[in-house]
Amino acid sequence: MISVLAILDVGSGEIMWILLIAVLLFGGDKLPGFARGLGRAVNEFKKAKGDVEREISRALHETPVEPPRPQPPQSVQQVISPQDAKLYPELAPPEPQVPRANPPSRTGGPESPGSQPPTAS
């Protein structure tokens, strides 16, 4: 990791001058409190950075969850070929029920129960 000192190109002599000026400005008793606060801030920053890195890594490696596919309704019949229907009649769909019409009468009129068909004379 690149340190702040490398970015600013600060040597040991410059650090000594900065520390001397800090002691003169704030006094010796307040510098430990500043150092503690600076340490806590650095730790919080590292913790937040780690949380963000973990979240990004989790999002990249997480597989998307596909919603379950809907199942066909139970009333849908299995489609089979006519050859299979001959071999396996239990798999064949039932034949559609067509309502039967009354057969036409011989006289062309409605038949009444108990009536005799006309005879030829």
Image (cartoon, rainbow, N blue to C red):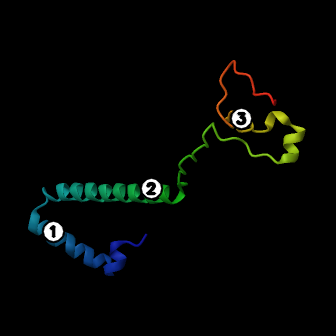
Three-letter residue code for mark 1: Ala
Q: Nearer the viewer, mark 3 or mark 2?
A: 3
Looking at the image, residue 74 lies above or below residue 36: above
**Percent of width and height locating residue 107:** 71, 34
Q: How busy is the neighbourhood of tag 3: few (under 14 within 10 Å), some, or many (20 plus)?
A: few
Q: Quadrant of the N terminus?
A: bottom left
Of marks 1 and 2, which one's residue comes earlier in the chain? 1
Looking at the picture, how far across and down is residue 56, in whole percent? 45, 60
How far apart, in angstroms, are the residues tagged by discs 3 and 1? 127 Å
When asked about the image quadrant of residue 100, the answer is top right
The mark tally for this picture is: 3
Q: Quadrant of residue 101?
A: top right
The reply, left or right, for residue 121 in relation to residue 36 is right
Q: Which mark is residue 54?
A: 2
Kindly report which numbered mark, 1 or 2, lies closer to the viewer in this rendering. 2
Picture residue at 75% right of the left edge, 26% below the top: 117
User: Residue 17 versus residue 82: which sits nearer the camera?
Assistant: 82
**Please, what secondary structure does the residue beneath circle 1 have?**
helix
Q: Is residue 117 above or below residue 65?
A: above
Residue 48 x, y percent position in the rendering: 34, 56
Q: Which residue is mark 1?
A: 22
Specify the farthest residue to the front: 121
First along the sequence among labels 3 and 2: 2
